Amino acid sequence: QTPVTQATAKAVPTLPDAQTVTQVKHYTDRLFSFRVTRPASLRFRSGEFVMIGLMGDPDPKTGRQKPLLRAYSIASPSWDDELEFYSIKVPDGPLTSRLQHITEGDEIILRPKPVGTLVHDALLPGKRLWFFATGTGFAPFASLLRDPQTYEDYDEIIITHTCREVGELTYGRDLIDSLRTDEMLAELMGEGFADKLKYYPTTTREESPKMGRITDLMRTGEAFADLGVPPLNPATDRAMICGNLAFNLELKEMFEEYGLEEGANSKPAHYVVEKAFLD
Ligand code: A2P
């Protein structure tokens, strides 16, 4: 059932749980972001995801159409009037092969039931918060980086983002730049918040100032030396991971070696993990 909200009522939805696309930005031939109207009833915690999608093709036998939905982290902060998403484009991906063609005014389906583990509630208090992302795994951190609680709860926030190519860093870099320069954000987040932030982008398949997988850069100690911090320590450090499966598993293994324990909503601990969406 479609919640009757100002946004959906105005758009006269033709889809169940329809929301209207308000903006689309393409970054590379593999990446784009978009914004949609937000149901007035939707409350979420920064870092959570929702199911979004489009109507699937009609069933050849019955002619019936079913929604084609995938989990997408909400990239916008909870105080934003709209919702933002950051997506990969997979040429033969059932959803993203079509989703990549949406334009302003189109409708998408959005099930307003946010869930997820990359939330502040799943971590014990600490001094330094690490966000580890690959590719579109940056999305939940785009939300958390614009959440005042992130800066209230920690003295230092470090975001690492590993991508194959330089162009894939643009979404994250633009967001970090906006944190440092946008006056409205500064007002919302509290004075000096951006000084707590360290951004560590790396690429693996195209030349950039810092090359290599973050996992390798941590093993050699190079990442810690560059950032001017000691290796992760359960007494001080908390971490959130969002990337491809191999990346998540490798980091989990490294964290266990550092003595960090995985947390959950029901049992907060030192780090939490979520898989980045792949179509
Ligand atoms: P690499 O180019 O060396 O595979 P993808 O686009 O395949 O999801 O990868 C996104 C980024 O994550 C790439 O830079 C990739 O590096 C990196 N990556 C993939 N697997 C791992 C892993 N197990 N540990 C660290 N980084 C990884």
Image (cartoon, rainbow, N blue to C red):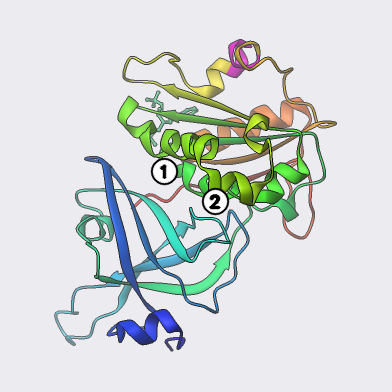
Under tag 1, what secondary structure?
helix
Q: Nearer the viewer, mark 1 or mark 2?
A: 2
* Residue 18 position in % (x across, y down): 35, 78
Separation (CA) of disc 1 from disc 2: 13 Å
Q: Is residue 154 magenta?
A: no
Mark 2 neighbour class, 10 Å CA radius: few under 14, some 14 to 19, many 20 or more? many
Does residue 269 sit above or below 105 in this rendering?
above
Q: Which residue does the image show at 53% across and 23% down from the upper left?
A: 214
* Residue 261 position in % (x across, y down): 76, 40
Ligand 1 shown in quarter: top left
Residue 90 in the figure: left or right of residue 87: left
The disc at residue 143 is 2
* Residue 3 position in % (x across, y down): 46, 86
Mark 1 neighbour class, 10 Å CA radius: few under 14, some 14 to 19, many 20 or more? many
Q: Which residue does the image show at 28% across and 61% down from the upper left?
A: 95
Residue 218 showing in the rendered view = yes
Q: Amino acid at mark 2?
A: Ser
Q: Which residue does the image show at 51% across and 33% down from the upper left?
A: 247
Looking at the rendered structure, the number of numbered marks drawn on it comes to 2
Residue 137 in the figure: left or right of residue 191: left
Q: Which residue does the image show at 44% across and 37% down from the upper left?
A: 172
Under tag 2, what secondary structure?
helix
Residue 165 showing in the rendered view = no
The magenta segment is: 218-224
List the single residue furthest toward the left.
60
Quarter residue 192 falls in: top right
